Image (tube, grey):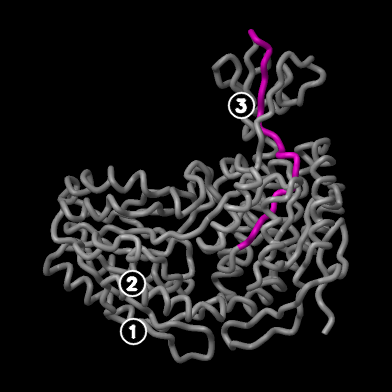
Amino acid sequence: MEMQNVLIAGGWRASKNPVGSYTALNPAMKSALGETYPVSGEDDLYDLFETGKTAAEQLRTVSPDRLADFLELFAAKIEEHTDVLVEIANLETALPSEPRLRNVEIPRTTGQLQQAAAAVRELSWCRATIDTASNIRSKFGPLGGPVVVFGPNNFPFAFNSVSGGDFAAAIAAGNPVIAKANPGHPGTTTQLARLAHDAVMETGLPPGTVQLIYRTPHDTGLQLVSHPFIGASAFTGSRNAGLQLKAAADQAGKPVYLEMSSVNPVFILPGALRERGDEIAAELFGSCSLGAGQFCTNPGLIMLLKSEPTEAFIKNVADRFSAGAPGTLLTASGPDNLLNAVATLVTAGAEIIVGGEIAEADGFSFANTLLRVDGTMFLDSPTALQTEAYGTASLLVVADDIDQLKQVTAVLEGNLTGSIYTDTQGEDDDTYDIIEPELRPRVGRLLNDKMPTGVAVVAAMNHGGPYPATGHPGFTAVGLPAAMLRFAALHCYDNVRLHRLPLELQDTNPTGAMWRLIDNQWTQKDI
């Protein structure tokens, strides 16, 4: 069967000397879809890097308005082709067409592209800084090489390597993108890349601004984060794969931004449990089972204090897990990966309350799974008991008292999120004040009385956190313009004549609305 083309050097062409091929699966039916995709070898990568380097050089002279035009046009094309995109993504992921794909993820995707365009036009993102006495001026600008984006399997639009947040941030910062498609939804990624390439050509950007390959052998793929021409890379996926990429990038001195594993602890304090335990149980199951548990912010660790109300709450949650229909997992390896994760938890001392086995279903599926362990055992094996189970599987930790709960909190690994549920009358305030100082440095986003699965695309959002949630706690993958700074270099100009400076650093404010730090004062005024 003829293989799909790759997008390299400004055009769609057959892969040069591919080293293999693969076919995507429909996870709801466990059946192969029709198209075959190439596994790219050294020849394709050579062309990717050469083209990306040239595109990065060409983008230096492209105006911010033209970058913004591209982002806005691409968003419009996605909206125009929603029906086709949703149909393909549904086949490749089994995620519901409505509301998930059409009504939630497509608007989020176009919205973040539009937010990136607005940040590019307004220009404050580059943090122009001017010291008039020394005539030293600096701002953030492009890296000088392409950004490689590895998209995950769970968000075929909003985190896609050709349309997601990393893509939008990299382009907005002035860099070309080399997209590595996720094997789970190559057809969706192809359609998005066609729209992106059309938008590139219509707005007059360098032809190599957006490139796409599907898969590479392991050793060859490490070059995607370590080649001398690469500016940076962004990866969302498993901890094992992320750390291999990080090792290769670190050895080459290349920036790599990783989103890996997170169990997202949820603390439910006694007052909240007594006040609205049934409501919280419903919220918890809804959050745990959303998308069959395949969210990076899925609550995998539930912290409780020993009591009779806690036991009643656990039964309530267990009944919901037992009654709920298992969702369809994204990949053929999903059920076995969950089986292995649950086995690790059980070996470390956890007890299965509900589930724990591969489900009998037409698609790839695993029974909704709830486990429990006491605080003493958790403290004995904290690493194993924080194993991420990527699906509707959560571990309840029941601590003897507040002191032990604090000790448990102190051994938590880094997470994207941490939530604390408290009562509305202030009964839990003292306990909150004990737990929060331990939890705060271990999470990127701290929530109160709210489950973590919703990630709002707003400027204040932090979708990041300490290791192993990510590779660096100072950056976010969601929230513009902050996400753009991952793909920017600090450009400093010392005594450079005014007419040779970038517009952002000249005496006249180029937009009138741009904020600049001039002589230690933030201002929109001219010098």
Q: How far from the left and from the top, in percent, is residue 155?
A: 58, 65
Say what secondary structure mark 2 lies in: helix
The number of discs equals: 3
Q: Circle 2 sits on which residue? A: 345
Is residue 295 at least partly visible in the picture? yes
Residue depicted at 48% across the width and 83% down the height: 365
Q: Horizontal placement of 337 versus 66: left or right?
A: left
Q: Is residue 136 above or below residue 252?
A: above
Is residue 81 at least partly visible in the picture? no
Instruction: Find residue 515 and name its label.
Output: 3
Q: Is residue 39 above or below residue 207?
A: below
Give whichever of 56, 219 is nearer the camera: 219
Asked whether residue 143 is drawn in magenta, I would say yes
Q: How far from the left and from the top, in percent, is residue 121?
A: 70, 37
The residue most toward the left is 308
Location of residue 81 (image quadrant)? bottom right
Question: Which contiguous range is marked in magenta?
Answer: 133-151
Residue depicted at 34% across the width and 70% down the height: 394
Q: Circle 1 sits on which residue? A: 323
Residue depicted at 17% across the width and 45% down the height: 430
User: Spatial distance from mark 1 to mark 3, Cα to Cα?
Assistant: 54 Å
Callout in the foreground (2, 1): 2
User: Spatial distance from mark 3 to mark 2, Cα to Cα?
Assistant: 51 Å
Q: Horizontal placement of 457 versus 144: left or right?
A: left
Q: Which amino acid, by three-letter code, is at mark 2? A: Leu
Q: How far from the left and from the top, in percent, is residue 127?
A: 61, 29
Q: Which amino acid, by three-letter code, is at mark 3? A: Trp
Q: CB atoms at circles 3 and 2 under 8 Å apart?
A: no
Q: Which amino acid, by three-letter code, is at mark 1? A: Ala
